[in-house]
Image (spheres, coloured by chain):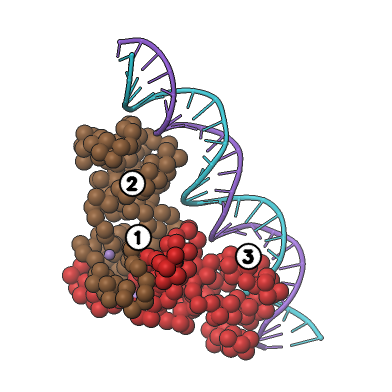
Chain colours: A brown, B red, C cyan, D purple
Amino acid sequence: MTKVQAADLLRRNGIKKTRQREAVVRILAEAQAPLSVDSIHVRLRHKDDSVNLSTIYRMLEVLLEKGLVEQMHHPLGSKFTYVLSAYGHSHHLTCTRCGVSTRMDSCPVTTALGQLEASHNFHITGHRLEVFGVCAACKSK
Amino acid sequence: MTKVQAADLLRRNGIKKTRQREAVVRILAEAQAPLSVDSIHVRLRHKDDSVNLSTIYRMLEVLLEKGLVEQMHHPLGSKFTYVLSAYGHSHHLTCTRCGVSTRMDSCPVTTALGQLEASHNFHITGHRLEVFGVCAACKSK
DNA sequence: ATGTAGATGCAAATGCATTGCATTTGCACT
DNA sequence: AGTGCAAATGCAATGCATTTGCATCTACAT
Ligand SMILES: [Mn+2]
Ligand SMILES: [Mn+2]
Ligand SMILES: [Zn+2]
Ligand SMILES: [Zn+2]
């Protein structure tokens, strides 16, 4: 995602444009998996485009309210992680050996949940699914 | 679960039996939903069978290693919660209004994941699913 | 009954996330 | 372009959940 595209995303959603916010959005856009606040922080430093940790937290709070990111727990550790929801609702396969997450292309529960809804007299508004296992790379060791 | 049943569970799994451990196991057994460490602590105090917080944390670590409890994140807040896995693999519907969780009787993803496994060259060993929505009680308000 | 490995309680430490406050900055309006 | 002000930022302090070090106690094998 270019600087311009990032700036557009912000403006379209009525979020004031700053160097820090552009930078964070671009990191999220480049990522292929959910990122922790800390790893966003590290990636920014590495790019010499450093942003204070609090600022990142506050920025993600804003993106969350606007529905622009999805927040989830890291399946192993105990941090929150974030993905641009522009990428759409998604789930991940997480390797319990190496910790790497890869995105699944589809959601394996949507249909099943439809049925569930009726039987439980519960209005379903969302769900989270995480799948664990051993990735191809770790299997071959 | 009686004191004796709790003691049995511990002995069968080679876990040294103490007043504290019996008490924690019994609380988990009585619970109909995942409990946070803190809520276990509170319930124990209320029963005049108080156990130190660290002890509860350490005990759950042991139960986790032995596979006797499942650990998950509280779907809303940011604490871990625990359920006896004697109750079997399970998922919960969580109300985003009142926070109450109710157990689903079956797992809506097992079959779907079987197919997934082949297509991703990923050996699946487990999964977590949380479903959100509005419960019957909150709907009628 | 005794010895010992392991369990407990308490306090301090850690890790992640949030908040208060002084300063800076974006941006709407001249 | 210049000005004003609300909102954003950095930094330090704080909050809350969880973990750890250590002295003491206890279960249980012998
Ligand atoms: Mn889904
Ligand atoms: Mn399941
Ligand atoms: Zn792996
Ligand atoms: Zn409810």
Residue at the spot of label 1:
A99
Camera-nearest residue between D20 and B67: B67
| Mark sitting earlier along the chain (2/1) | 2
Q: Position of residue B81 (x, y in %)?
A: 49, 67
Residue at the spot of label 3:
B53
Tags 2 and 3 in contact by the CB under 8 Å rule? Answer: no
Q: Quadrant of ligand 1?
A: bottom left
Label 3 Cα neighbours within 10 Å, binned few <14 / some 14-19 / many ≥20: some
Quarter of the figure with the N terminus of chain B: bottom right
Residue at 68 percent across and 70 percent down: it is B45
Q: Horizontally, is B5 left or right of A16 in the view?
A: right
| Image mark 3: chain | B
Q: Is residue B140 above or below residue A46?
A: below
Q: Visible in this render: residue B73?
A: no
Q: Position of residue A111 (x, y in %)?
A: 23, 72
Per the image, label 3 sits on a secondary structure element best described as helix
Q: What's the mark number on residue A66? A: 2
Q: Amino acid at mark 2?
A: Lys
Q: Visible in this render: residue A15?
A: yes
Q: Amino acid at mark 3?
A: Leu
Q: Position of residue A31 (x, y in %)?
A: 27, 49
